[in-house]
Amino acid sequence: MPSPPAVSAHRGGTERAGAATWQAYEDALLSGAEYVEFDIRRTVAAGYVVPVVERAVALLGEDGFVATTLEDRSVAAISRVFPRVRTALSLGRHRGGVGPARLARIRLSELLPMRRIRACGATGVAVHQRLARATVLREASRNGLFTMVWTVNEDRQMRAFLADPRVDVLITDRPRRALALRG
């Protein structure tokens, strides 16, 4: 029987402190969550990808984190320079500033992402829960990919994803609740 998914505190979680605060990250570490997510925004432009991942490797080791991004070219750069670092292509981009024609292409590439994943060399996907339920978990499982599902905060959805053997990591703002539901 496969082990239940690990729990990741999205931006440290929000159960006892504001998201992405020092207190939230401290609480996430105390909660028992196996992963704590934090965002680094400037990695795509001006060659920041490699120095940021070098720093993460120095602090956490090659197997101590998962590098996730919406940008295929960033995943490709990480995969090329750090082949032993786990990478996940993030799927479920927000619409902001994207025209209807481009949005349709993006959504199709997210529903059927294997071509993108192979091209950038990702070892997994970090997928929005709606896309996960639609097609992505099935495709990721068929192809042996590491899977992370985000951001799941409602009890019913948490129970469903925690029981799904295709999910490796559940990302939530409520890590303590997810851990309690996981039992």
Image: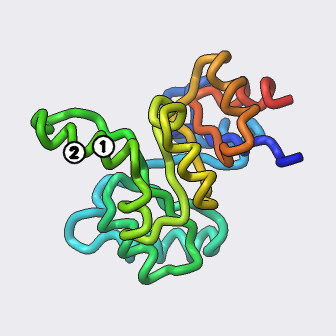
State the residue at coordinates (59%, 50%).
147
**Residue 78, located in which quarter of the rendered image?**
bottom left
Label 2, on which residue? Answer: 105
- Numbered tag placed on residue 108 in the rendering: 1
Q: Callout 2, which amino acid?
A: Arg
Q: Position of residue 26 (x, y in %)?
A: 64, 42
Q: Nearer the viewer, residue 165 or 156?
A: 165
Badge 1 crowding class, 10 Å Cα cut-off, few under 14, some 14 to 19, many 20 or more, is few
Let me know if residue 21 appears in the view.
no
Q: Position of residue 73 (x, y in %)?
A: 30, 67
Badge 2 crowding class, 10 Å Cα cut-off, few under 14, some 14 to 19, many 20 or more, is few
**Residue 162, located in which quarter of the rendered image?**
top right
**Residue 64, located in which quarter of the rendered image?**
bottom right
* Mark 2–mark 1 CB contact (< 8 Å): yes
Q: Is residue 69 left or right of residue 183?
A: left
In what quadrant of the picture does the C terminus appear? top right
Q: Position of residue 37 (x, y in %)?
A: 54, 47
Q: Callout 1, which amino acid?
A: Leu
